[in-house]
Image (cartoon, rainbow, N blue to C red):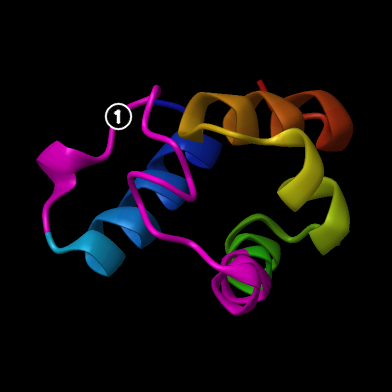
Amino acid sequence: MSKVQTALIKYLAERVGDAGQVTMSSDLINDIGLDSLDTVDLANHMEDELGIDIDNIDIFRKAKTVGDLIEMIRKNYGFR
């Protein structure tokens, strides 16, 4: 598991209370229940964990699923 995937899944699993509920295809809004404030918290967490600066609007508009978000971070911030 990549650093990005590990950090994201750990954060989301704590939010939903069960790591088994967080999959690559989990919808960030419908399955995980993120709202606009949660998106800001998630961005702040990923910035701290990965040492990057994430545009919150970019996350909200482009990433529908956990897998989408991981790919967006990988492509835009140089992670593999």
- Asked whether 9 or 78 is in front, the reply is 9
Q: Quadrant location of the C terminus?
A: top right
Q: Identify the residue position indicated by label 1 in the image.
A: 23
User: As drawn, is 47 to the left or to the right of 64?
Assistant: right
Q: How many marks?
A: 1
Q: Position of residue 7 (x, y in %)?
A: 45, 51
- The x and y percentages for residue 50 are 65, 55
**Left or right, residue 16 beside residue 17:** right
Q: Nearer the viewer, residue 46 or 55?
A: 55
Q: Position of residue 46 (x, y in %)?
A: 62, 60
In the picture, which quadrant includes the N terminus?
top left
Identity, as a three-letter code, of the amino acid under mark 1: Thr
Above-or-below relation of 24 to 15: above
Q: Residue at (44%, 36%) from the top-left corner?
A: 27
Query: Dividing the picture into quarters, in which one does residue 17 lie?
Result: bottom left
Magenta stretch encompasses residue 66: no
Determine which quarter of the picture holds residue 68: top right
Residue drawn 39% across and 59% down?
Answer: 33
Q: Is residue 39 visible?
A: yes
Tag 1 secondary structure:
loop
Residue 59 lies, in percent from the top left, at: 75, 48
Magenta stretch prevailing secondary structure = loop
Magenta stretch: includes residue 24:
yes
Which residues fall within the magenta stretch? 18-42
Residue 73, image quadrant:
top right
Up the image or down, 69 lies above or below 80; here it is below
Q: Please determine whether, in this image, residue 59 is positioned above or below residue 3.
A: below
